[in-house]
Amino acid sequence: MKKLSTSLIAALWAATSLMASQAADIVAKKVNVDLSRVSYSSDVWNSAVFSEVVLYPQTAIVLNDKKANEINAVTKAKKAHVSALYDGKQIAFLIKWADGSMNIQSGYQSDTYADGFAVQFPAGVINPEALPYIGMGSEGRAVMVHLQKAVKAHYEPNGQGNVYYQLNPNQTELFEGELEAFNQKVKAIGSNDYEKLFIAEGFRSTTEIKDGTTFSYARLGYKSEGWMGSLSRPLKDVYVDLNRGAIPVAFAVWDGEKMGRDGLKNLSAWLSVELEGNGDGSALIMAVNKDSAGDAVAGKEAVATNGCAGCHQVESTDAPNYMGPSLSNVGGYATAAYLRESILSPSSVVVPGYNRNAHSNYMWYTEENGKRVSTMTDYSWLDAQTLENMVAYLQTLKAEVE
């Protein structure tokens, strides 16, 4: 990629300079309560202040699942309400979202999908203008993901390592009263908690954390046609440092009724969380929340002129184009800074390919010295105003909110 000139960098900064103080998306109130095991039903939330956030449909890549694609042919963004608290050592989040059906996954079925939620943090924020890619992180910019799904009670693992109680009742030698007593013991140790932690630094790098080096406590409950999900975790551990004036966070929710799973969910962009009274977080809040100052109308024309539709589906009404990820909702889950980086340095984050629906001659990336290099044109030659106009237009690409 061509190096950006000093004048271009200065122009970009001028186009996005902070004209007035930005408000954080979410404010984490400090409390004098131990939050290490707070759940969605804890009294500590009774006086909490909630912020409305929007979760947009993930549409970058079309799944190879005809039924799922039909069900999700028309997708809308979801509103959710989020609150945050911290006690000086722990931080806790509560997210509420509407869902007219309860979808709970059973370990005995492979054709059902669960409702659930995830909370994501960057592993470290060195430059708030260069946050990791939403969902999977990016090379050198890892993310930590907390995942919680709605599942039926299960016995493996049950936390006790007793394989005897993981048996199907039909595989025991017990009958009548003895079998009833056995089943009662199984029920007593059963768990419907499905909490997993992952670290990721780019596509295909997601790794579950099982070494006990971090602790979190997530719970999920359903009430009045909606889910409530809570997460509490340390402000700082070996993976992330959240003990700052402001931090980025992202949320995702899955709808099992719509066959939601990896690649099919609703997710937010990076959101800014101000930790009340914990220092100055204005730089992070500005980087996350500042929209482009460009002209979206001129940006639409520039996107067309520069041939973006040759590889991408740009708007949702355009025909699918499998030569690159769809941009039809990119404004919903990408910051202005990420969009700039994607245009100027397309190899910074490379979506894996090729897509099975693409032509075999059109790979999304090549490999050079063991690194993926995007086949997208490098647009670092664009003048600053055209770039900002394109970013402004791309930020308008987002689904209608239901």
Image: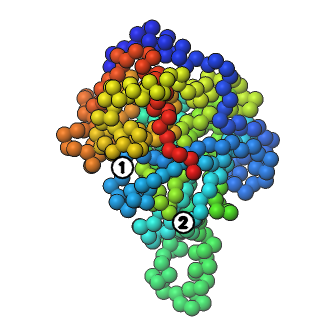
Question: Which is closer to the viewer, label 2 or label 1?
Answer: 1
Which of the numbered marks, if any, corresponds to residue 104? Answer: 2
How many numbered marks does the figure carry? Answer: 2
Q: Which of the two residues, 49 or 43, is positioned nearer the viewer here?
A: 49
Question: Mark 2 Cα within 10 Å, few/some/many (few <14, many 20+)?
Answer: some
Q: Amino acid at mark 2?
A: Ile
Residue furthest to the left in view is 361
For residue 324, which quarter of the picture?
A: top left
Q: Amino acid at mark 1?
A: Val
**Vertical order, 389 against 265 (above or below):** above
Q: Which of the two residues, 369 or 21, is positioned nearer the viewer here?
A: 21
> Which residue, given by chain and number where applicable, does mark 1 sit on?
62
**Vertical order, 23 against 266 (above or below):** above
Q: Position of residue 17 (x, y in %)?
A: 58, 17
Question: Mark 1 Cα within 10 Å, few/some/many (few <14, many 20+)?
Answer: many
Q: Position of residue 262 (x, y in %)?
A: 43, 52
